[in-house]
Every structure is written in structure tokens, then in C-alpha cells.
Image (cartoon, rainbow, N blue to C red):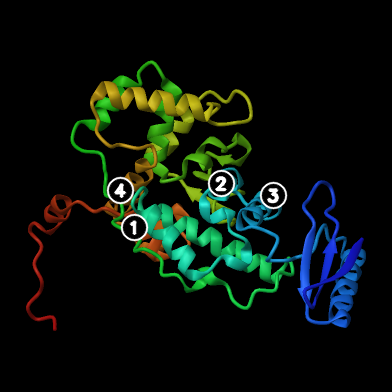
Amino acid sequence: MHTITQSGGRWYVTFTGADGEPPVAKSFASYNRAKAWATRCEGAQARYGAAGVADPYSVTLGDLLLRYGREVSTMKQGAKVEGYKLAMMAQMSLGGLRVADVTSKAIATYRNERLAKVANSTVRSELSLIRRTLEYARREWGFELAHNPAALVTLPPPGMARDRRLQAGEYEALRTQLANHPLVWAFVQFAIETAMRRGEILGLTWRHVNLTQRTVHLPLTKNGKPRTVPLTDGALEVLEKLPQQGERVFPIDISALRWAWTEACRKADLKDLRLHDLRHEGVSRLFEMGLSVPEVQMISGHKTVTCLFRYTNMRPLDLARKLKGRRRDPDII
């Protein structure tokens, strides 16, 4: 339901909020324009089941971020993490701005404030979420925005890629500290041998393992595309030693995995070594085995070569050993 009132020479259309939502209002220079807008809104509500009027003057950016989390993020593989980010951003000062007041300057100020507290990659991710949310609101939710202000804001540089790899003795130290956690140690070995993501390993089921063909199939991955991962001898040995009890290959809770890893690193005095660094280690080792870029990309599942190379950290000493005794034929131009 709507009401049209006149005040100060302008006509105001007010829609009563549904399900506890605040009322939505908009002003016009003439009664005819106000009536036409109200009629269009009611027609859209009746035809498409709209829950409210897409008015950038009554909805905050935080409202949009939360809605994006409910309606869009839930369809993604990383829904839980993205939903957490969106909820956190909705509570910040920028989230309290009305959509109509969200300018590129406001977003740039938010960017600069966040850069003083968190890493460049985190800020890039947050700005990307804001941009996607506003664009979705323009295209799908009927918000009449002349442009997407987030698209005008310069992203901070991605920063240096992590280059943390296992150093001499660290693999053995992990094995010693995880001796009482055989399933966690098997996870560590398998992660290095396959360069698979943590979630992919924990979600792996025995029905997708083919020991005869030396492959594991991943129907659900981070980039949304299924892939089949060929297994090294080391990865095959890990699977052959695991008991096939239950559906999951690695029946371990993520919290238990993190705790065991953190304790092992603490007791072994391993500085700045993360679980995700095992993927860096795995990708680098595949290249050191002599595999080509397309071959490693097929195993790791990176969408682009640029992303793949951020996970590749070749050791100069290893390359120096390969170059020993090798000379270029001077007759070859």
C-alpha cells in the first residue's frame, strides 16, 4: 500500500514497509509523476513478488551486502567465508551509508582506512565484493544507479605472493610431531604430493578414488569446475595405507586439523608455516619434477597461468644443480 501527500510544493509517495521493514518514500515535482511511479512499483510487486521498493535513498549499503550474502553468496562454493566477510563489512561505517550516498570517494576512503589495518589482498577482496554487490543491485534488484561507484576505485596492488616453502629438516620435524596423529600426517603428505586445496582433500570420498588408474576425481572445486587429479607415487602410497572405513578418505574435522597443525608447528618451532603453504610446496615440486605449465595447471586446478605462478616458488639452488654440467651448443643460433 502507498500514500501520496503534498508538502513544500513536492509530492511524496510512501510505501508501508512489509515484515517489519522501514517504509520507503520518494518525492516528485508533480502529482502525475508521483502517481505513475507508485503504480509502476505496485505493478512490479504484484508481477514479480518484490519484497520492497528498490530505492537507493532508503536502503543502506549494509542492507545490500547482507542481501547479497543471502541470495547470491549461498550459491557459491565459498559461501560460508564470503557470508562472514559480507556481514563484517555491513557493520562498518561504510555499510551505514544509504546506497545513494555511496560514492567513489567514500569507497576510496574506506580502502585507505582498511589498508592501515589489513593486507592488500584482504582490501582487494572486500572492494570486489562491494563492486559485485552494487552491480547485482543495478542489474537484478532494480536499483536505479547511474553507475557503479566501486568500479571507479583503484584497487591496491596485490602485494607479494607468499614464497614460504619447507626448508631443510622441516618435513622430518613435522613427521615427528605428528607421529601421534597419523591421519593428519597422511593429510600433510597427500597435500604436498597432489597440490590439492584443503577443502578438496577433506571432501574427498572413496567412490571418487581410482587406485588402478591412479586418479582422484573432484566433482566440486573452488572455481566451480570439476577436475581429475593424477596421482604421484607418493600420493598413491598415502591412499593405499589409509583404511577404507566410511565414505570420506580423510575423516577429520577442520578444527581438529588446524589444532594438530598449529601444535606441531609450535613444538617443532616452525615459523610462519601455514597449512595453505603445502599447496605452494606441492605446485613447486611438480614443476621441479619436470612437468609443463599445462600439466601442472591441470593438476592444481588454477584458472589462469598468472594464478598458478603465484603458487610457484622455485629454489635457485635446485635450478643451479640442474644447470651443472649443461652447456649451450655454440653452433645453435
Q: CA distance from mark 1 to mark 4?
A: 14 Å
Q: Considering the image in quadrants, where does the N terminus appear?
A: bottom right
Label at residue 91? 2
Label at residue 70? 3
Q: CA distance from mark 2 to mark 3?
A: 16 Å
Locate residue 88, reporting x and y percent. Answer: 54, 45
Query: In the rendered structure, which amino acid carries the disc numbered 4?
Result: Arg
Mark nearest the camera among 4 and 3 is 3
Q: CA distance from mark 1 to mark 3?
A: 32 Å
Query: In the rendered structure, which amino acid carries the disc numbered 3?
Result: Arg
Q: CA distance from mark 4 to mark 3?
A: 40 Å
Locate residue 190, reporting x and y percent. Answer: 42, 36
| Cβ atoms under marks 1 and 2 closer than 8 Å | no
Mark nearest the camera among 1 and 3 is 3
Q: Crowding near pointer 4: few (<14 within 10 Å), some, many (20+)?
A: many
Residue 295 seen in the figure: no
- Give whichever of discs 2 and 4 has the lower sequence position: 2
Identify the secondary structure beneath mark 3. Answer: helix
Q: Say left or right for 235 vs 54.
A: left
Which residue ends up furthest to the top in the rendered image?
Answer: 180
- Give whichever of discs 2 and 3 has the lower sequence position: 3
